[in-house]
Amino acid sequence: MDYTGYMNEVAKRREPLVIRELFGLQHGAPKDVVFLTAGAPNPETFPIVSGSLKLRDGTTLELTPDKMVDCLQYGPTPGYPPLIEQLKTITETIHTPPRWKDREVLVTTGSQSGLLMALEMMLTPGQTVLVEQPCYTGVLSVVSPYNPKYLPVESDGEGLVPSSLRAALASCSPHNKPKFLYTVPTGSNPSGAVTSEDRRREVYQICRDNDLLILEDDPYFFLHYDGKTPPTSYLSLDEDGRVLRFDSVSKVVSAGLRVGWVTGPRQLVHKMNLHKGSSVISSASMSQVVVSELLRVWGLEGLARHTAQVRQFYQNKRDSMLQAADKYLTGVCEWTVPAGGMFLWLKVLGVRDTWDMVMRRGLEGKVMLVPGHAFMTDPIRPCPYLRASFSATSTPIMHQGMKNLAELIQREKELQRMKPQQG
């Protein structure tokens, strides 16, 4: 594929930074080459010389003095080399992407920074943008300042609806066609939907027919519930090289380490790497080394065991919230059982708009949720939805929260009934 047409003029003009290229050469150069190039601080001045991290299973990760130098020094822009190789192995083993030799992996500061670089590589003011709706608010916050023409694509309990994608594409102007589709196919934020495999294949073919890239944002990939195997990823289906896939350790290892990675066509990942080199220079070395050492100790089997434990933990949390919702919200709200992720997406019955109910009266009602507006392409339009998170809340607190929510909704309905009388 020729990717030039997907890039904006800024991305096309990005050129390699000489200093970063020399820094990259230094990592693979013979030992007898003298480099007087980098402005790196001398490790003898670093105040930390070693460290150890104790894991929950009792294992200890030892950060030797040599490893600690890697932790505290500048690193290559694409990522810590051992970690890059580990992430390539994980991605290739799990997804077996076609044309693997034509793809590249770039370490990102969580998925969000990867999404930012990809979007800023393609977006222009007023551009038509295809996103699933409801949509992850972190992407809307990047796209909306470009004053885009949004084409929202409907999603339901089985994820993105292919017929809605076709209808959205049929409605767009031939002079302002979208360049990409953005989607969270596993444990969608906020709905918790997992797009079925049949739908993924159909969506991929639609994007193929319309020459669209797919931004596959999959931070909840390992959080799929009820014993089901996750459907084939878009990356696994990608015969053409039209998928940029975004992964993260945030949901299964640590959110604070801020380690993610993007996998995609070499030409596009190269442009994102140039963006990264001129902004953050490199991802945090300490975080990368810690994740790399963890993956080294675990291996693929250990990673699979850990993610299975995390998945069961969050499935139990989900089930607890569903029990609380059944007890307090039956007849008050509607919802679909989330097949993945960390959230329950609630439609409040009899309340046309949830914004004031939460943002003005939620604290007084002793419960706070995210109003559905945050996930809509038109935040002004009335929205009856709420997002409730079950990831970090105990079962008793969930029940109290659902009870408080039911009471808050009841008071909101009473306020609505009073308004015509006050008028």
Image: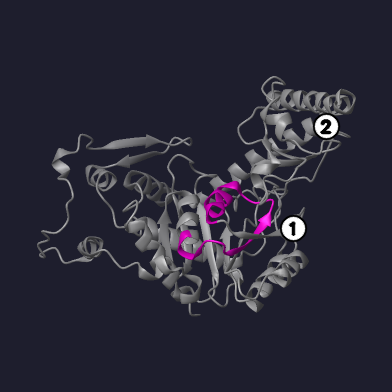
Q: Does residue 229 appear left or right of residue 256 in this picture? A: right
Q: Does residue 198 appear left or right of residue 375 in this picture? A: right
Disc ID at residue 74: none
Residue 150 position in % (x across, y down): 64, 59
Residue at mark 1: 154
Camera-nearest label, 2 or 1: 1
Residue at mark 2: 329
Q: Residue pushed farthest front?
A: 423
Residue 154 position in % (x across, y down): 74, 58
- Residue 1 to residue 301: above or below: below
Which SS class for mark 1? strand
Which SS class for mark 2? helix
Could one spot residue 177 in this view of the protein? yes
What residue appears at the point 68 percent right and 43 percent down from the top-left corner?
373
Residue 405 position in % (x across, y down): 76, 27
Q: Which residues are magenta?
A: 120-146
Count neighbours of disc 2 (C-alpha within 10 A) and say few if under 14, some if 14 to 19, many if 20 or more: many
In which quadrant is the C terminus drawn?
A: top right
How was this image coloured?
one colour
Viewer-proximal residue, 244 or 122? 122
The amino acid type of the residue labelled 2 equals Leu
